Amino acid sequence: MRNEKHHKGWNEIKTNDSWALFKIMGEFVNGFEKMSKIGPCVSIFGSARTKEGNKYYELAVNVSKKIAEAGYGVITGGGPGIMEAGNRGANLAGGTSVGLNIELPFEQHDNPYIDEDKSLDFDYFFVRKVMFVKYSQGFVVMPGGFGTLDELFEAITLIQTNKIGKFPIILVGSDFWNGLFDWVKNTMLSFGNISSEDLDLIKIVDTENEVVEIIDAFYKGHTLSPNF
């Protein structure tokens, strides 16, 4: 009897998983339809916990203003902290301001600087991550936590394995990023687990002007288009 109950419960889970596919497909369809109309954008990532007045919040505002002034839209995760700063800078410059929102237990709530018609809501992290990667012409990565690192290393992995086209990955804040990437170069590279070419697209900078210069220089030789 106990095994029969376990099997019944397992079958119910499998049935629920099958029905979840329709919800997942709906998120993909809605995301693709809305994002495909927005045009070239740059994604800005960073901690949801960074408060207004923090040097990296203010730098993220300035970076996103410069990006918008250069003609790119700005995509963020739609929440507070660095995400808010990214949307805020784009909004101040009169540029396209996109928010890919997800409901989280502690940190996430929509920020007020997202364009009303460019605020998308997701239940699934993996669907949301596809939208970031598919429709971004570059990643600007401010100091952040595990979620920021997740987005960063997924993009590097997809480029490394030729699953998506190359685009610039710009890490802002040398005092935050240098230690990590010294380890990547001195340990991962020396162990032979990556190639030096894998690091070619990753730049570490400290100013908004450097960010835009890198993006513009890259697209002098590459076409602006979705990544896969």
Image: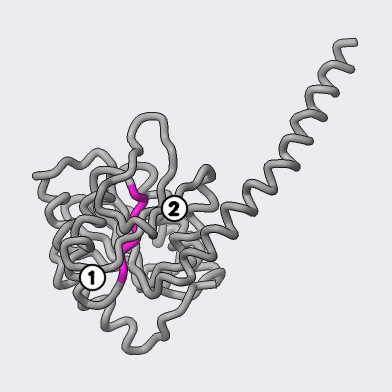
- Residue 54 counted in the magenta span: no
Q: What secondary structure prevails in the magenta region?
A: strand
**In-image side of 133 versus 60 (left or right):** right
Q: Give the range drawn in magenta.
A: 73-78
Which quadrant of the figure has residue 204? Answer: bottom left
Quarter holding the N terminus is top right
Q: Which of marks 2 and 1 is nearer the N terminus?
A: 1
Q: Which residue, given by chain and number where applicable, does mark 2 sit on?
A: 120
The quadrant where residue 15 appears: top right
> SS at mark 2?
strand
Q: Callout 1: few (<14), some (14-19), or many (20+) C-alpha neighbours within 10 Å?
A: many
Question: Identity of the amino acid at label 1?
Answer: Ile
Which residue is at 20% across, 55% downward? 88
Residue 65 image offset from top left, x and y in percent: 18, 66
Q: Where is residue 8 in the image (x, y as percent from the top left)?
A: 84, 23
Label 2 with label 1: CB-CB less than 8 Å: no
- Residue at 44% from the left image edge and 58% from the top image edge: 191
Binning the other alpha carbons within 10 Å of mark 2 as few (below 14), some (14 to 19) or many (20 upward) gives many
Report the residue marked by disc 1: 67
Residue type at tag 2: Leu
